[in-house]
Image (cartoon, rainbow, N blue to C red):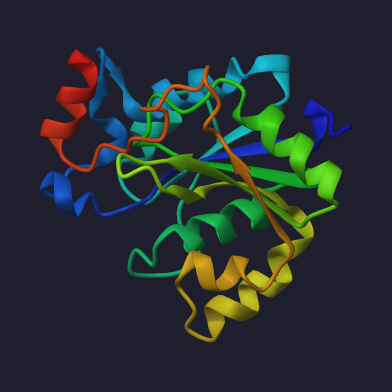
Amino acid sequence: MIESRHITALILAGGRGTRMGGVDKGLQTFNGIPLALHTLLRLQGQQGDLVGEVMINANRNLAAYEAFGAPVWPDSLPDYAGPLAGFMTGLERCETPYLLTVPCDTPLFPSDLAVRLAEALGRENAEIAMAAAREEDGQLRTQPVFCLLRAELLECLVAFTHEGGRKIDRWTAMHKTVTVPFDQPDDDPRAFFNANTLAELHSLETR
């Protein structure tokens, strides 16, 4: 069984926020709370207290993020290189055997995310456990920014990104990955809805 002291969580808030008009997405509010802080609080309340330390990956407004009380680290790769740059930053700073990644723009992610990913990773002796959710068309699709990773994958990720690799799916395909479906009757069908625009964020609040 993976224990809480073995998992560090990373909030991914380092994007350009292009589809939100260039605003810093993690600082936009959801029910009156900045998205990144909302994500932090949701991680700290994970079922079974499976998450230990939480870090934030951000590339702008670092002081604002630091005010949330968690360590803040910018990308080690230049030019907003995407989620894998955040993964690499988290793995570089992770002092535990496992890293849990969660984006800042999906405020209803499951409260038992860490528990179910950790159970699957251990059961399958996998290197990566990745969430999957059933979308409106009925298809079960992976949610590649919701991952539990073995910290030992850092060296491979550094090599992949230094060769120009930027696609999460291409990198995870290189490793033993178990997909964890969140499509049970009690699972919220909106759990993995990510707000790419302010209108979508406001819509999610009202729903």
Q: Position of residue 121 (x, y in %)?
A: 77, 45
Quadrant in which the N terminus is drawn: top right
Q: Residue at x 75, y 45 (%)?
A: 98
Q: Residue at x 70, y 64 (%)?
A: 154
Placement of 75 over or under 181, stated as above or below: below
Q: Depth check: give the residue in front, 35 or 58.
A: 35
Residue 37, quarter of picture: top left
Q: Depth check: give the residue in front, 42 or 76.
A: 42
Placement of 19 over or under 28, stated as above or below: below
Q: Position of residue 170 (x, y in %)?
A: 53, 73
Quadrant in which the C terminus is drawn: top left
Q: Position of residue 64 (x, y in %)?
A: 34, 31
Total labels: the figure holds 0
Q: Residue at x 66, y 55 (%)?
A: 91
Placement of 56 over or under 80, stated as above or below: above
Residue 6 left/right relative to 85: right
Residue 126, quarter of picture: bottom right
Q: Residue at x 84, y 29 (%)?
A: 3
Q: Residue furthest front?
A: 138
Q: Depth check: give the residue in front, 5 or 123.
A: 123
Q: Residue furthest right?
A: 1
- In the rendered image, is residue 53 in sight? no
Residue 11 left/right relative to 127: left
Q: Residue furthest bottom?
A: 163
Q: Position of residue 135 (x, y in %)?
A: 36, 41
Placement of 108 over or under 104, stated as above or below: above
Residue 90 left/right relative to 31: right
- In the rendered image, is residue 50 in sight? yes
Residue 81 left/right relative to 4: left
